[in-house]
Image: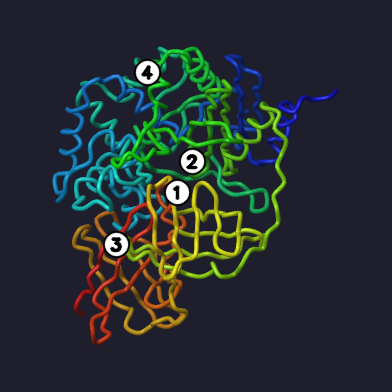
Amino acid sequence: MILSPLEQALATLPSAYPGPGGAAAVIKDGQVIGRHSWGFANAETRLPFTPQTLFRLCSITKQFTCALLDEFADKSPFDAAIAGYLPKLEEAPPGIMDLAHNQSGLRDYWAVAMLHGAPTESGFGASEAHRVISGTRSLHFRPGTAYSYVNQNFFLISEALEALSGRSFAELLRTKLFERHGMNTAFLAADTQAMPDGTQGYEGSEATGYRPAVNHIFWTGDAGLGASLDDMIAWELAIDTQRDDPQGFYNRLSAPVTFRDGTPARYGHGLQRGTLFGRTMTGHGGALRGWRSHRPHLAKERLSVVVMFNHMSEAHSAAASLAAAALDIAPVSQEENPGNRALLGHYLDKKTGLSASVTPSASGTKLSLRYAYPPETLDLWTQNGAGREGTRLSLSDEGLTMTRPLENRIIQLRCLAERIRHDGLAGRYHCPELDSVLTLEGAEGAVYGGFSGMLGQGRMERLQPLGDDVWLIPCLRALDHSPPGYWTLAFQRDETGTLTGVRVGCWLARDLFYRRCQE
């Protein structure tokens, strides 16, 4: 029996992306042209993974939250509601659409929770969320000027939807979206500890073995969607049905969005905007420990793909492979280009206090950039630059210029000297804005640090030196799937060389100052 390219791509998913189980579907021209499930939704109870298995869609939820918001013609009451959630903010608050477009300037609350000392697998619900959010005093950029991925943007939208409608977010999802579009088993799966049908998410790999993932956070508008593959097929079919209606719900969500300066934005209404194989695409991924999902939608091609894994394999790549098969696109071989070593090194963005490291990738033919998390792989590595559409590096007089169109930012990176200053690091540092404490202990190559605050006492991690007075403190596991990765610690000294404080930040939460405490 000869399989079509799509049938073959679906059949190879379990081996190409190994794990306990999964499901995928491809919808083309208003028809389901591929639908496949395999493995186990719960390996311990031997519950099979089927198209009806309930699954955590995680951040794919964001477009559903924005679809509810879009039903309100007058958004001004929402702006006032958002300002009310930020009583201590000392500058102009973001508006509701700044939140929907991830242009709010707020720091991500799950990243900030780690500075408050939250243990990795601790509980985090509405009360903890409001404690963290209500303490916000500053933004890490002016609303509407840049992009930063912030989960509580959509938590706050769902909170405002409840307040202004007088109905629960779960009820709004059910009556306004799920029932309307034939998503018969979809629901708000706020509690990440368990799913009602027993589906389990898994950490690990075939090399290390799989273990049930432990999560104790509660999600609403940011990532709370629970749905089956068949529910998501119904969503994609509803999108196709309205494809020619300019006022159709998905056409409104995927309409062009800009920053304040008029520059086109690549994220809006809970949807990423970009290209796939040169075709215009909207979509989103979702992730939590033990769960991965992705759904790209190519409107002109009338093509949608949905991939669900109850393990940590890369759903984005799997979805792209199915889209390529559906469009009969042959794989493109990558050119090997070892480039030039002039770009390699450790750098500091003085404006935000964030560090960046540029190293060869594992293959040695591309570059790995650690700035956000996870690190990015940059190709087209040449004598004077690297990167493509998402991130571009080019040599400058002071170091590197990093262009990040998604964020609407051009960043000047200063090269850090190789020498490291170890003297005087140990001690306690206090952040007045968060009332958080950074404790550093040890000396030379064995300096350890940890944060503590209103959510607990975080674990101690060994600091990693970068150069000058800049260090990293690892944070590779956090409340959410996407952790801070590494906190940059940029120490400051007075004219005598005495440490006075440290700027702390990661891409999700930047530019917080910790003052050195007097012993």
Task: Looking at the image, tell me whether mark 4 or mark 1 is earlier in sequence order.
Answer: 4
Q: What residue type is labelled 4?
A: Arg
Classed neighbour count for the residue bearing mark 3: other residues with Cα under 10 Å, few (<14), some (14–19), many (≥20): many
Q: Nearer the viewer, residue 168 or 343?
A: 343
- Residue 178, image x, y percentages: 41, 17
Q: What residue would you read off at disc 3?
A: 452
Amino acid identity at mark 2: Ala
Q: In which quarter of the image is residue 62?
A: top left
As displayed, is residue 84 above or below residue 226? Answer: below
Q: Which x, y percent locates residue 99?
A: 30, 37
Quarter of the image where the C terminus is located: bottom left
Q: Earlier in the sequence, mark 3 or mark 1?
A: 3
N-terminal-most mark, 2 or 1: 2
Q: Which of marks 3 and 1 is in front?
A: 1
Question: Horizontally, is 476 left or right of 30 in the view?
Answer: left
CB-based contact (under 8 Å), mark 2 and mark 4: no
Residue projecting furthest to the bottom: 496
Q: Which of marks 2 and 3 is nearer the N terminus?
A: 2
Q: Distance between the residues labelled 2 and 3?
A: 26 Å
What amino acid is found at the position of numbered circle 1 in the picture?
Answer: Ser
Question: Mark 3 belongs to which amino acid?
Answer: Ser
2 and 1 marks in contact (CB < 8 Å): yes
Q: Residue 287 carries which label?
A: 2
Residue 151 relative to residue 46: left or right: left
Is 269 placed above or below 497 here?
above
- Return the x and y of residue 131 as percentages of the image width and height: 22, 47
Judging depth in this view, the residue of 119 and 112 nearest the camera is: 112
Quadrant where the image shows the N terminus: top right
Residue 482 badge: 1
